[in-house]
Image (cartoon, rainbow, N blue to C red):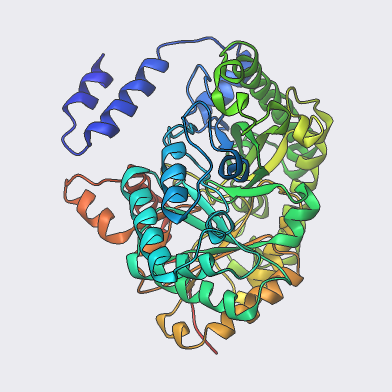
Amino acid sequence: MTNILNIIKDTTMTYEQKVMSLARAAEGTLNVLEISEMAQKYREEGIICDLNEGNSPYRPRYIVPDYERFITNGSEFLGIEPPKDIWEAVNSLLILYKHVPSITSFPVYIGNIDTLLDRFIEDEDEAYKAIKLFLTHIDRTITDSFCHANIGPKDTKAGRLILKAERELENAIPNITIKYSDETSDEFAIECIKTALVTAKPSFANHKMFLNDFGQNYAIVSCYNGLNTAGGSHTLVRLNLAGLSKTSKDENDFIENKLPEAVKIMAKYMDERVKFLVEESGFFESSFLVRENLIEKDNFTAMFGMFGLAESVNHFINSDIKEDRFGHSQRANELGIRIIQKLEEEVNKHEAIYCKASNNKYILHAQVGIDTDEGISPGCRIPIGEEPEIHQQLIQSAKFHKYFPSGIGDIFNFDSMAKKNPEYILDIIKGAFKEEMRYFSLYSTDCDVIRITGYLVKKSEIEKLQKGKQVLQDTVVFGMGAVNNNKVLERKIRKDV
């Protein structure tokens, strides 16, 4: 009751934020999952974390609708005919977004918006006005930075107008990824880089790698999560490798005993979440998204997340000398690979329920962290403040990316002078992708919009919240916590050469 009253009295929260917080508090009063004693122990110790999904799963964490089907067919449930022009297209999409749930209560994926809109462009001035209003509407109504759009891989009129609008608007929402491949022209990629140096988006996804893992029908959603379109992920639970390491005698005990045991415990906990969602919540039986084939249960998986690899490795290395630690020494990096290979092996031993999209296996995800992760690095990233030179970091990081089909990535903060030479950054991205890096994010030192871990927040909004003022987007709270606890404003600045 105290928690509920505190939510009601909180003057820094908007009405909408209070409603969603109260709903989460209500869900928290239920206990419908059969959780083992060890799973509960690990949850209390922070070794297993369900990322605030709640005690009673009643919607998948991430839903990835087939927006192409929607544009082609319209929606009987919503009473929407297939759009005939740019205005009808953006209006129809905005209506549908209101009805796409997720763990955040907002859509985490809003489509490959350039290809969705490009067919409707006749007059570019009119289309630009429609696209600017479309993007502004999204920023003001989907008030959560885990909302994600895709563009590419091909150059389109709509894609260029979207980039132009984002440079002008400098909005934090939606997050955007370009599916970058050999099909992407250098000219279009340069436009993407110019936009990212102003507004921290788009990020670059290695389209070839994602195609190999998912086929043509995939999307990048939420932070940087690769998932099947017309599907999604039932749940995302993460394993704290840093915390688990401290329960081990040594690195061999960790790899051979503690890690396999923890994987079994967490996988069974995930089973419980997925089982209740699919068998008891009624979501797949009641959603019009299913009836209209915008999503299908067989296209869903669930994500086995991890974080804190660097701290896990450094715990066993036991050295304060940077050259000995993760991201720098061969021994530390090889130990990191050994841990991840063992993690993959153990996760693949588990037969996952209702995960047909990933051959009934849980899919690995390098989780980007949350605001309370003090002193623990996201996924497989090198700790902030210990980053090597960019070429060294790219080569080191890329070695881990093949293990994480559902998402892993690194963030690079470039000096503002890099705006004069975006070709330099494109060369870096091309080199990184040749090394089989999966995902590359960038922004500039003078951006107001910055990438926190996988999501975007404005520094100016963080400053408002720090002064006790209301902010529109609820993820600003997470951003402020990450600034305070994870040193995200202290990333190494990369300079043009």
The quarter in which the N terminus is drawn is: top left
Residue at left offset 49%, top offset 34%? 100
Residue 382 image point, x, y percent: 58, 60
Where's the C terminus, which quadrant? bottom right
Up the image or down, 173 lies above or below 244; here it is below
Q: Position of residue 36 (x, y in %)?
A: 63, 14
Image position of 198 with respect to 52: above or below? below
- Residue 297: image quadrant is top right
Q: Nearer the viewer, residue 428 or 87?
A: 87
Tell me if I can see residue 436 in this picture: yes
Residue 392, by quadrant, is bottom right
Q: How far across and how far down the image is residue 22, in percent?
A: 31, 22
Q: Nearer the viewer, residue 253 or 198?
A: 198
Most foreground residue, 264 or 110: 110
Residue at horizontal 59%, vertical 75%? 189
* 345 left or right, relative to 66: right
Look at 40% across and 12% down and name the residue there.
29
Residue 373 seen in the figure? no
Foreground pick, 79 / 40: 79
Asked whether, in this view, residue 427 is left or right of residue 418, the answer is: right
